[in-house]
Structure formats: C-alpha cells, structure tokens
C-alpha cells in the first residue's frame, strides 16, 4: 500500500515515473496528493498495472487518480473516488491516457470527479477498453462525464457506461461519452444507460468525429 503521500512541488503523489518501466501488481495507491497524477504519473515509458486499486487520491490540477503515457496496460483494476480540480479547464478525475498505446481491460472506473472528463480522458491515444465498467463519474463544469475522447482512435467493447454526468454550467455535453477533433471511435456490445448531460445524455460528438456503433444499447 502507498498511502497519504504528497508531491509538494509537482506531479505523482504516490509514484512518479518518467520514461521508465513501471510494473504494479496487487497494489493499493490511496489518499495521495499532487499537482497532476494524484496517485500515479507515468510519462513516456511503459506502465503495466494488474489488480491495482487507485482510490481517494487528489490532484490540485488534472488526473486525480492516474496519468500515463507511452505503452499502458491496465487490467483487473479499480480506479475510484479520485478527484482532479473541479473548476473549468481541469480534467481526468480517474485516468488520463495521453500520447499512449493503451489497453484497459476488466477494470472498474467509478466515482471520480473533475472539471471535465470525470472518469477517463484519452488524448493522442490509440487504444481499446473492454470488459470494463465506467460509472458514477462527474464532469462538474464541462464535457465528458464518463469518457472524453480527443485526437484519439479508441475501441470500446463489452463495457457498461452508466450513471455518469456532465451537467455543469460551462459546456455540459456528453454524459456518457464526449468525442471531438476529427478522430474515430468504435462501440461494440456496449451499454450506455442512465447518463445525463445538458446535451447528449449518452454521447455527444463534435469536430468531424467518426463514430461506429454496433450491437450497443442506449437506454434509460
């Protein structure tokens, strides 16, 4: 367990890894605090997280739970109740995947909060999320209660995305999923239910985003 640590000046309250290989197994990362990456910040190397719990961490800027770039594999893990700054302009309450080749599998992302991208923010990512649950995350001011997809190609399959919200006063779009900036996403065997937003309760897309949706349920 890595608990109640603080990065006094910068990033990675629990762990900071820059361009290195980081392997986490059966580990709890909780109640840590930093500017970015309240629990973990792994930049430009390789991150493998298996059976990891990242919970109750705080970022005073962005990426409350975890920030990762490079090659990223997260499996069988729980990322919950983390918080980034909740004012407009700050993002990724649970997970920020940035400039990454990423795989997220058999993972729960829940109860996280940020100004936008309450659960997951993917930027410059080629990746896949499958056999996972993303629920009860909050974008308190802007878009993307569950997932915010930006300049990325993302496939989501066999995943439940539910009870996420984007209902703030600034840009309340995409309670479940928000997509922008000319890139593609695919939903296959996904359930989107009970998400809420000012516009696009389940999904909102802008900027020539291309969405391919098959065998998916969008329901109350």
Image (cartoon, rainbow, N blue to C red):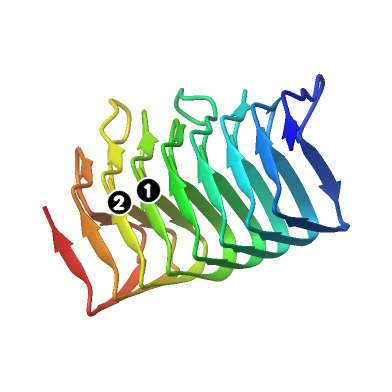
Whether residue 198 is visible: yes
Q: Which residue is mark 1?
A: 146
Q: Position of residue 120 (x, y in %)?
A: 48, 49
Task: Tell me which residue sits at (71%, 47%) in the image.
Answer: 27
Residue farthest along the left direction in this orientation: 220
From the image, which quarter does the N terminus lie in? top right
Secondary structure type for disc 2: loop
Category of crowding for the residue at label 1, using alpha-carbon neighbours closer than 10 angstroms: few (below 14), some (14–19), many (at least 20): many
Secondary structure type for disc 1: loop
Give residue 188's quadrant in the image: bottom left
Q: Position of residue 79 (x, y in %)?
A: 53, 45
Q: Using residue 151 as the reference point, say whether residue 182 is left or right of it.
A: left
Query: Marks 1 and 2, Cα distance to the nearest angstrom?
Result: 5 Å
Task: Tell me which residue sits at (31%, 56%) in the image.
Answer: 161
Q: Position of residue 60 (x, y in %)?
A: 62, 23
Q: Position of residue 32 (x, y in %)?
A: 69, 27
Task: Tell me which residue sits at (72%, 23%) in the image.
Answer: 4
CB under 8 Å between discs 1 and 2: yes
Residue farthest along the bottom direction in this orientation: 214
* Total numbered badges shown on the rendered structure: 2
Residue 176: numbered disc: 2
Give residue 217's quadrant in the image: bottom left
Q: Using residue 57 as the reference point, say whether residue 172 is left or right of it.
A: left
Q: Is residue 149 above or below residue 101?
A: above
């Amino acid at each position: 367990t890595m608990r109640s640590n603080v990065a006094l000046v910068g990033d990675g309250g629990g762990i900071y890894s820059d361009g290195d290989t980081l392997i986490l197994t059966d580990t709890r990362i909780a109640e840590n605090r930093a500017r970015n990456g309240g629990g973990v910040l792994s930049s430009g190397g390789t991150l493998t997280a298996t059976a990891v719990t990242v919970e109750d961490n705080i970022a005073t800027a962005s990426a409350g739970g975890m920030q990762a770039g490079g090659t990223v594999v997260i499996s069988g893990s729980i990322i919950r109740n983390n918080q980034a700054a909740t004012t407009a302009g700050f993002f990724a309450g649970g997970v920020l995947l940035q400039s990454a080749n990423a795989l997220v599998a058999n993972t729960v992302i829940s109860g996280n909060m940020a100004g936008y991208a309450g659960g997951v923010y993917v930027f410059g990512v080629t990746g896949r999320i499958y056999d996972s649950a993303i629920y009860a995350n909050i974008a308190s001011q802007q878009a993307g209660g569950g997932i915010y997809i930006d300049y990325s190609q993302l496939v989501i399959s066999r995943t439940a995305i539910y009870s996420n919200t984007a209902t703030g006063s600034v840009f309340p779009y995409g309670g479940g999923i928000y997509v922008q900036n000319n890139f593609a996403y695919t939903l296959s065997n996904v359930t989107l239910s009970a998400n809420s937003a000012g516009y696009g309760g389940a999904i909102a897309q802008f900027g020539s985003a291309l969405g391919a949706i098959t065998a998916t349920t969008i329901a109350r």
